[in-house]
Image: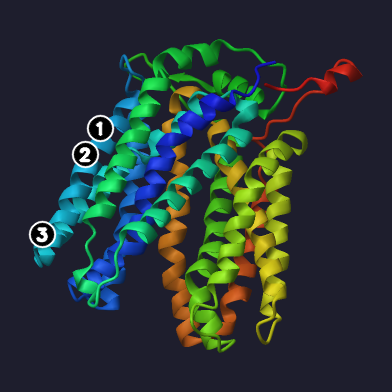
Amino acid sequence: MVKMNYKRTILIGLAFMSICSFWQFYDNEIPKILTYHFGLGETFTGVIMALDNVLALFMLPLFGALSDKVDTRIGKRMPFILGGTAISAVLLFTLIYVAHISSNLALFIAILLLLLLSMGTYRSPAVALMPELTPAVHRSKANAIINLMGTLGAVYTLVMIKALLKSAENEADTNYIPLMISLVIFMVLTVLILFITIPEHKLISKVREGVDDFDGEGDIIRKELAEADTQNTDGSVKQILTKDVQKSMSFLLLSVFLWFTAYNAVTTAFSRYVTEVWDLHNGAYADCLMVATIAAVVAYIPIGALSVKTGRKLTILLGVALMSICYFAAALMPSFNTIMNFYFALIGIGWAAINVNSYPMVVEMGRSNVLGKYTGLYYTFSMAAQVFTPIFSGFLLEHVSYRILFPYALFFSVAAFITMSMVKHGDVKPTKKKNILENFDIDD
């Protein structure tokens, strides 16, 4: 059996750690710069902040597919990761320096747009590096580690914000230069370590030569794909999905859209919900969201291990069901109760069960040479939900009632459970051991 290489997976996760450190800064501090330094109102700030999700709809599938077609001495994904990180670091430095010395909003937005474009060039290749270098059966556990590494990158930024952003009498005078330097160094250093320690081109061959004794859906899909190959006009092989696999892929991607629609509505509107419905103020919402985040982080690794035993689909369905029950319970609460922290902890665990397994199921339905394409597809549907749900749920909150938030999340979560139950491919389950003693074999 091919065993899980934890050291390699952690090193692969450095790319996602670098990316998440940037997005934590972007989500927290760019709105403040736009509002306090450049004097933009909430509406225009919101429009600019939505640009990353809109661009992601096009950038992530495009560059994911492009990375599938690249073959260099340093690998398929590594050129995008190295080039994207280098350009993004330069643009981040330029962006903050311009904001520090100037009040030219047009120049700031132009540089910000270029920065978002550069970040979009390597997110899908960076994420696709994990399934590229990980045997199929271990991808849920590996994805758990990747998510944990991303969280650590976000935590690094939060720590640096607290340590390096000195309070000023006027928010517009905040000096972001020290924070920017720490982020640029962190982004570049983590990716350099990745490049030095992970010889992608060499490892791809090694992983593909490995043979495991797991008889899962991945083997069936690869056989079906081989039987479905056709020739392009130029004689090259055209990759197509069989009808059954295509149906499963469609239901899975629809499920991704639906559960992101539910979850993102809650996380983006909960701060206003507690004020409007429960009459709580002074950041009272933060405890629940923090509990959900901590619960998800703690659950990542155990859920990754559990998924190997129970299967990805069942673990996801349990996670969606758990979140649906909590949305229903929260909808019935007329006022705040400390039990909400418990509900949000369960929501975090359910979200971890979904996140750890959904992406590996998507890439499992494709061949190894189109992992970037399917990575981009996954992000297309998740990002589409994050563009759609703030607008649609915001309309309902404004014109119907704030109390519709949790029924709204419940509706889309139940819909996700139904569509996910229709997925028949993308799972990986271990075969029964030949004898009882093999059950005590421990992976390195």
Q: Which kind of residue does numbered mark 3 sit on?
A: Leu
Residue 90, percent from left and from top? 19, 42
Do the residues under discs 1 and 2 have CB atoms within 8 angstroms?
yes
x, y percent for residue 221:
61, 26
**Residue 8, position as x, y percentages in the image:** 52, 24
Q: Earlier in the sequence, mark 2 or mark 3?
A: 2
**Relative vertical location of residue 223 with respect to residue 383 in this rendering, above or below:** above
Among the 4 quarters of the image, the one containing residue 308:
top right
Residue indicated by mark 3: 107
Using the numbered discs, state the Cα–Cα distance from disc 2 to disc 3 in whole angstroms: 17 Å
The residue nearer to you, when weighing 241 against 203, is 203
Q: Earlier in the sequence, mark 3 or mark 1?
A: 1
Q: Are marks 3 and 1 in contact (CB under 8 Å)?
A: no
- Disc 1 marks which residue? 83
Residue at the spot 43% in from the left edge and 64% down from the top edge: 388
Q: Is residue 277 left or right of residue 375?
A: right
- Is residue 68 visible from the viewing direction of this image? no
How crowded is the residue under tag 3: few (<14 C-alpha within 10 Å), some, or many (20+)? some
Mark 1 closeness class: few <14, some 14–19, many ≥20 residues within 10 Å: some
Q: Residue at x 72, y 74 (%)?
A: 339
Is the C-beta separation of discs 2 and 3 under 8 Å?
Answer: no
- The picture places residue 64, in percent across and down from the top left corner, at 37, 35
* Local secondary structure at mark 3: helix
Residue at the location (47% across, 67% down)?
A: 389
SS type, badge 1: helix
Mark 2 highlights which residue?
87
Q: Is residue 355 visible?
A: yes
Q: For the residue marked with disc 1, what is the amino acid?
A: Gly
